[in-house]
Image (cartoon, rainbow, N blue to C red):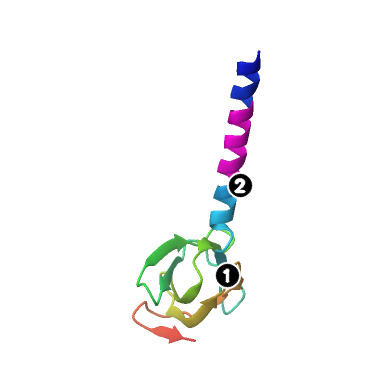
């Protein structure tokens, strides 16, 4: 009976430590999110959104959803740029985005009709 109790206690404590350390490991990261729309305020789904960490050169790519929203979760603190591309629209670039520890940053992109070769840098 004592061995059973000890085994259960070790399992419970181990699970607690596992989940506590996993939560703490992610707690310093932030989020970058936003809405992609055109000049008439119509949302643009399926746009390609690229988040570039300027310091490390690491890129992460997402697609905006049907509602025009995009989300980059678990973003390390640092300086970033965002590029948004969609067929029939000019490329949108936002530079010098600072993500702080546990910070949430919103970057909304308003795309203008045009070709992909054209870009609008903010």
Q: Which residue is mark 1?
A: 101
Residue 52 image offset from top left, x and y in percent: 41, 72
Residue depicted at 46% across the width and 65% down the height: 47
21 inside magenta stretch: no
Q: Residue 69 at x, y = what percent?
A: 57, 63
Q: Is residue 110 visible?
A: no
Q: List the residue tagged with mark 2.
A: 20
Placement of 12 over or under 42, stated as above or below: above
Say whether residue 106 is left or right of residue 87.
Answer: right
Q: Foreground residue, 55 or 119?
A: 55
Give the magenta range. Answer: 9-20
Identify the residue shown where x is 36% and y is 68%: 58
Q: Determine if the magenta segment contains residue 14.
A: yes
- Above or below residue 62? Residue 57 is below
Instruction: Name the dominant secondary structure of the magenta segment.
Output: helix
Label 1: how many Cα within 10 Å (few below 14, some 14–19, many 20+) = some
Q: Is residue 87 left or right of residue 10?
A: left
Which of the two residues, 86 or 69, is positioned nearer the viewer here? Answer: 69
């Amino acid at each position: 009976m004592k061995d059973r109790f000890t085994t259960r206690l070790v399992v419970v404590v181990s699970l607690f430590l596992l989940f506590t350390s996993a939560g703490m490991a992610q707690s310093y990261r932030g989020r970058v999110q936003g809405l992609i729309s055109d000049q008439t305020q119509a949302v643009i789904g399926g746009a390609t959104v690229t988040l570039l960490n300027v310091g490390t050169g690491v890129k992460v790519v997402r697609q905006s959803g049907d509602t025009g929203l995009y989300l980059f979760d678990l973003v390390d603190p640092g300086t970033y740029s965002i590029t948004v591309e969609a067929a029939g629209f000019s490329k949108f670039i936002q530079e010098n985005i600072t993500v702080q520890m546990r910070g949430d940053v919103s970057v909304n992109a308003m795309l203008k009709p045009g070709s992909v070769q054209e870009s609008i840098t903010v």
